[in-house]
Amino acid sequence: MTAEPWPTEIRLLDNGHNLRISFDDGASFTTSAELLRVRSPSAEVQGHSPADQKTVGGKRNVAIIAVAPVGNYAIRLDFDDLHKTGIYTWRYLRELGETAEASFAAYLQELAAKGLDRDRPGEA
């Protein structure tokens, strides 16, 4: 069994608009607060099944205002739009860091398909 990725540093950058997380194997990822917010693992965004998943617009300028530990396996991110229910496991943060470019491109396609954009609040 492969060991879970373990963070060695978690740091807010650019006044909370980016989060950098470094892992014990030397990997390091800087992920935008926008992507972390719109891909929040919370039930509010993910729903309780894939059919319930929400596409959230209007988060281009969202910032992370707090990072709180959750046990020894995750963090909770508090955003300035008052969203704070997502529990980001180390594995999820690693996966999102590794796939950030593709995930963000998919998000932009979802916005366009649903008539939403990065600057106007809304969800579909």
Image: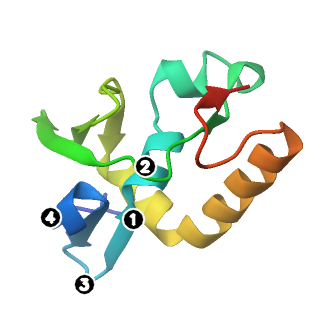
The residue that label 2 is drawn on is 36
**Residue at image location 31% in from the left, 80% down from the top:** 27
Depicted 61 relative to depicted 27: above or below: above
Residue type highlighted by circle 2: Leu
User: Disc 3 marks which residue?
Assistant: 26
CB under 8 Å between callouts 1 and 2? yes
Q: Assign the N terminus to one quadrant of the image.
A: bottom left
SS for dot 3? loop
Quadrant holding the C terminus: top right
| Secondary structure under the numbered disc 2 in the rendered image | helix
The answer to which of marks 3 and 2 sits earlier in the sequence is: 3
| Residue holding disc 1 | 31
Q: Earlier in the sequence, mark 4 or mark 2?
A: 4
Mark closer to the chain start, 3 or 1 = 3
Which residue is outermost to the front?
120
* Residue, far right: 113
Front-lying residue, 94 or 67:
67
Q: Secondary structure at mark 1?
A: strand
Q: Which numbered marker is on residue 81?
A: none
